[in-house]
Image: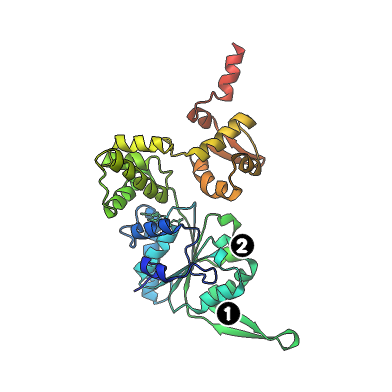
Amino acid sequence: MSIIADDSDFEKIPKDKKNPIIKPDAVEFDRNFENCIRPKTFDTYIGQTALKETLKITIKAAKKREKPLDHLLFYGPPGLGKTTLAGVIAQETGVDIKITSAPALERPRDIIGILMSLQGGEILFIDEIHRLNKVAEEILYPAMEDFYLDMTTGKSQTVKTLRVPLPKFTLIGATTKAGELSGPLRDRFGIIHRLEFYTVDELAQVIKRTAGILDIEIDEEGAKAIASRSRGTPRIANRLVKRVSDYALVKYDGKITRDIANKSLDILKIDEYGLDTTDRSLLRLIIEKYDGGPVGIETIAAAIGEDVRTIEDVCEPFLLQAGLLQRTPRGRKVSPATYRHLGYKTKQQTTQQSLF
Ligand code: ADP
């Protein structure tokens, strides 16, 4: 079996926009690094236990019925393993996978081309599926539901509609914003799952596995120290283990211990919650300039020089889940825990002090 998006195949794919089979937004280095440490089977895919069990049963049932899997939608913040899981499903089902992303499917011919290139049973993975345009969505509906394409030929009075059959395939969609998916598209997925943030123990396993592949020496406490600052996200854990390893190699004998991990993460300005300088300046801004909020996301973005999408997709999910940020109809606000974490007096403490 060959998975189209595997390392060797990836190198053959031109990065040209005309070819929609890409893994977008990934710097070359990151892509190679990620591909070599990406788990390929359920056994090596750590955590997400309930989801894995459900998927194993779904795969077994599909095999018994000798039918392709139902279309699946995975949602959750970036770096939690949606793309990886799609590859695992392909491997475990014994079928090929084509990987693309909604922004690469701008023109009708992009999506038509990719659908017509599918072989029976194959998996089509569309990342950032909430960004599909209306035309691409309309093309997908009959393809997902009844496996055909409606194509038109000719002009004005001579226009004809052709119904082109497609092989049966499984669409796996991934999104960081399930809420932005149109209702009709969401309804066409048989299985919809949210990926959860990982626990420190799970991330420590991810880190030890990655360290093993990259030949990095690390002890249990070192792995846990990195895990606890990885914001519940395997992609971040993998990046940090690499950076800490550089530090351990240059400053010490190369082995990562708790002490070395903590020292290098301090140097990288990643605090014990896993917050980096962008997160902290966002939270500080709300405290110092807006008295804890609420304040609109556009104002925050302009003030800290980040774009709204990066804040919403990358920074916010973890800050919300950690209870350091709250979304209200009038904008974002921080919690008393944020004041404490960043070393500010809470509003209550300040009021009490001024009373005495
Ligand atoms: P997403 O598609 O959700 O943005 P990816 O699937 O690209 O995330 O995962 C990011 C990186 O994290 C991958 O390179 C992979 O090695 C690692 N990873 C993700 N999930 C797991 C997991 N469950 N076990 C081990 N490593 C994982």
> How far is disc 1 from disc 2 in space, using C-alphas?
20 Å
Left or right of 257 in this view: 308:
right
Residue 229 in the image, given as x and y percentages of width and height: 40, 40
Q: Quadrant of the C terminus?
A: top right
* Element type at mark 1: strand
Q: Is residue 189 above or below residue 198?
A: below
Q: Quadrant of residue 351?
A: top right
Looking at this view, is 161 or 259 the one in front? 259
Residue drawn at 59 percent across, 31 percent down: 287
Residue 60 visible in rendering:
no
Left or right of 130 in this view: 265:
left
Give the amino acid type for the residue marked by disc 2 in the picture: Gly
Question: Crowding at label 2, few (<14), some or many (≥20) Cα neighbours within 10 Å?
Answer: few
Question: Crowding at label 1, few (<14), some or many (≥20) Cα neighbours within 10 Å?
Answer: many
The residue that mark 1 highlights is 149
Foreground disc of the pair 1, 2? 1
Residue drawn at 33 percent across, 44 percent down: 246
Toward the bottom, the furthest residue is 158
* Element type at mark 2: helix
Q: Is residue 133 above or below residue 44?
A: below
Residue drawn at 61 percent across, 80 percent down: 150
The residue that mark 2 highlights is 183
Ligand 1 image-quadrant field: bottom left
Give the amino acid type for the residue marked by disc 1 in the picture: Leu
Residue 156 visible in rendering:
yes
Q: How is the image coloured?
A: rainbow
Residue 238 in the image, given as x and y percentages of width and height: 37, 49
